[in-house]
Image: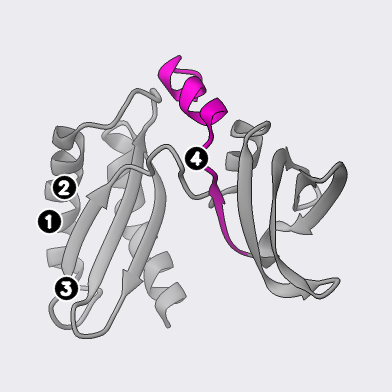
């Protein structure tokens, strides 16, 4: 249900966000006592997101969400940038951040393990993503990745400061 809801919301708000000059990175919804709809976006020009950028996105998507009303009940809307130690949620993220370290958790264990950490090598046309861990190349179907996130390292910080990512 939650994945269907987030996909529906992404389809609703994605075109509006893109027309404003942003890429929709992730939509996440956590229910419960204090429900939260989190929208993660980044500028298409790859400049740093500002508080004003987040406020502009929030105002635009609030209007869409008020009309479409995809979530019953109350929830808090949070709009943010992916940050420097961002999640890897699209195959193109693996190509963009190749060379940096990431943590990956799979839906199903491979050789008895679900969690891996290594240098991102990229995504392939066959739907797999690859990392190098301890000198060994490991490939996983992109669809089997539960979560993936860049690891905050000096190299990542340096690249961000130079405006390379």
Q: Say if 53 sits above or below 127 in the image.
A: above
Residue at 37% from the left image edge and 74% from the top image edge: 5
Q: Nearer the viewer, mark 4 or mark 1?
A: 4
Comes first in the chain, label 4 or label 2:
2
Circle 3/circle 1 CB separation < 8 Å: no
Circle 4/circle 1 CB separation < 8 Å: no
User: SS of the residue at dot 3?
Assistant: loop
Residue at 60% from the left image edge and 34% from the top image edge: 97
Q: CA distance from mark 4 to mark 2?
A: 31 Å
Q: CA distance from mark 4 to mark 1?
A: 35 Å
Q: Nearer the viewer, mark 4 or mark 2?
A: 4
Q: Is residue 159 magenta?
A: yes
141 on left or right of 96: right
* Dot label at residue 63: 1
Circle 3/circle 4 CB separation < 8 Å: no
Residue at 20% from the left image edge and 53% from the top image edge: 61
150 on left or right of 49: right
Q: Is residue 126 visible?
A: yes
Circle 2/circle 1 CB separation < 8 Å: yes
Q: Looking at the image, which is closer to me, 5 or 103?
A: 103
Q: Say if 139 sits above or below 43 in the image.
A: below
Q: Which residue is mark 3?
A: 75
Comes first in the chain, label 3 or label 2:
2
* Dot label at residue 152: 4
Q: Nearer the viewer, mark 3 or mark 2?
A: 3
Quadrant position of the N terminus in the picture:
bottom left
């Amino acid at each position: 249900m939650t994945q269907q809801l987030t996909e529906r919301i992404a389809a609703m708000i994605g075109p509006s966000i893109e027309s404003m000059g942003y890429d929709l990175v992730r939509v996440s919804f956590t229910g419960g006592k204090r429900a939260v709809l989190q929208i993660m976006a980044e500028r298409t020009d790859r400049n740093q997101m500002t508080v004003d950028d987040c406020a502009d996105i929030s105002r635009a998507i609030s209007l869409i969400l008020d009309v479409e009303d995809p979530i019953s009940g109350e929830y808090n809307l949070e709009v943010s940038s992916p940050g420097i130690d961002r999640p890897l949620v699209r195959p193109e993220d693996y190509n963009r951040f190749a060379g940096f370290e990431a943590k990956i958790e799979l839906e199903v264990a491979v050789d008895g393990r679900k969690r891996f950490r290594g240098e991102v090598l990229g995504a392939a046309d066959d739907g797999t993503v690859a990392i190098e861990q301890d000198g060994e190349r490991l490939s996983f179907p992109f669809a089997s990745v539960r979560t993936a996130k860049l690891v905050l390292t000096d190299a990542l910080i340096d690249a961000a400061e130079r405006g390379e990512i």
